Amino acid sequence: MNTLTEKAKHNLKHLFEMGENDTFNSERGKLVPQEDFVQVNNTVDLEYTIYFTFHHYISSNDMNSFYDDNIIKKLDTCIDNLYDNKQFNQLINDDDYDFQQIIDDIDNKLTNLKDRYYYQSPFYIFFKKYHTFYNFCKNILNENNIYIHRILNVTNRDIHREYYEEEESEQSGEEEEGQGNSGEVEQAEQSGEEAEEKGEETEEEQVDEKGGKEE
């Protein structure tokens, strides 16, 4: 959350909870409550603070704030509180300042915002439920992102036949291993036969040598 958002959130909280006799000062766009009313010529700062706070939320693209936080209702309540508050009501009715024009501009933009979101209509309720359901499904997908990624990865491999290619390579590897083993067996059999032939030859030679001696 950046500094401007924190400042707007701070101001909205005070405007939403503002009472009839509450008084405020403005310091660098931030509302500062005062316990006792002190007449300070900071009307321009107050005008800027109010203008900044409302336009920060009206121009926001955060759907969660409009549906989950019900920001439209809060802004509407804040405008009513400005009219009910003695300090701001005096500024609104004072012709020496442009505060009335600022409030009118904010009120018009808030009305357009209500129309855009179909506020206080059955469509608003429908879109709010749809937004809630959408976030619910999105959270499920985020929580199971690892498993979904595995499923999509396997599907992608099937589409590109990578899975089957791996199976074929494994099968060919097994065949090569089988051929290698059979070759070793044949070589062993051949060496055994050669050893037997050599043994028979040696035996025949020995028999011949014994026969020669006897003669």
Image: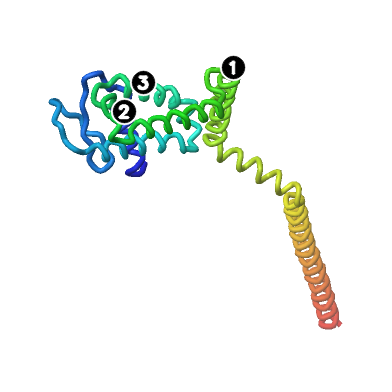
Residue bearing mark 2: 92
Mark pair 2, 1: CA separation: 35 Å
Q: What is the x, y in percent for residue 72?
A: 45, 25
Amino acid type indicated by mark 2: Ile
Q: Mark 1, residues whose alpha carbon is within 10 Å: few (<14), some, or many (≥20)?
A: few
Report whether 83 appears left or right of 119: left
Task: Work out whether residue 148 or residue 140 is closer to the camera in this orientation and state it.
Answer: 140
Instruction: Return the disc, 3 or 1, that comes first in the chain's sequence.
Output: 3
Q: What is the x, y in percent for residue 25?
A: 21, 34
Instruction: Return the disc, 2 or 3, that comes first in the chain's sequence.
Output: 3
Quadrant the C terminus occupies? bottom right
Q: Mark 3, residues whose alpha carbon is within 10 Å: few (<14), some, or many (≥20)?
A: few
Q: How many marks?
A: 3
Task: Work out whether residue 139 or residue 165 is closer to the camera in this orientation and state it.
Answer: 139
Report whether 204 appears left or right of 71: right
Task: Work out whether residue 8 or residue 151 is closer to the camera in this orientation and state it.
Answer: 8
Amino acid type indicated by mark 3: Asp
Q: What is the x, y in percent for residue 38?
A: 13, 30
Report whether 168 appears left or right of 75: right
Mark pair 2, 3: CA separation: 12 Å
Q: What is the x, y in percent for residue 24?
A: 22, 30
Residue bearing mark 1: 122
Q: Residue at x 28, y 35 (%)?
A: 96
Which is more foreground, mark 2 or mark 1? 2
Which is more foreground, mark 2 or mark 3? 2
Q: Which mark is residue 207?
A: none
Q: Is mark 2 on a helix, strand or loop?
A: helix
Give the quarter of the image for residue 14.
top left
Give the quarter of the image for residue 127.
top right
Give the quarter of the image for residue 204.
bottom right
Residue bearing mark 3: 80
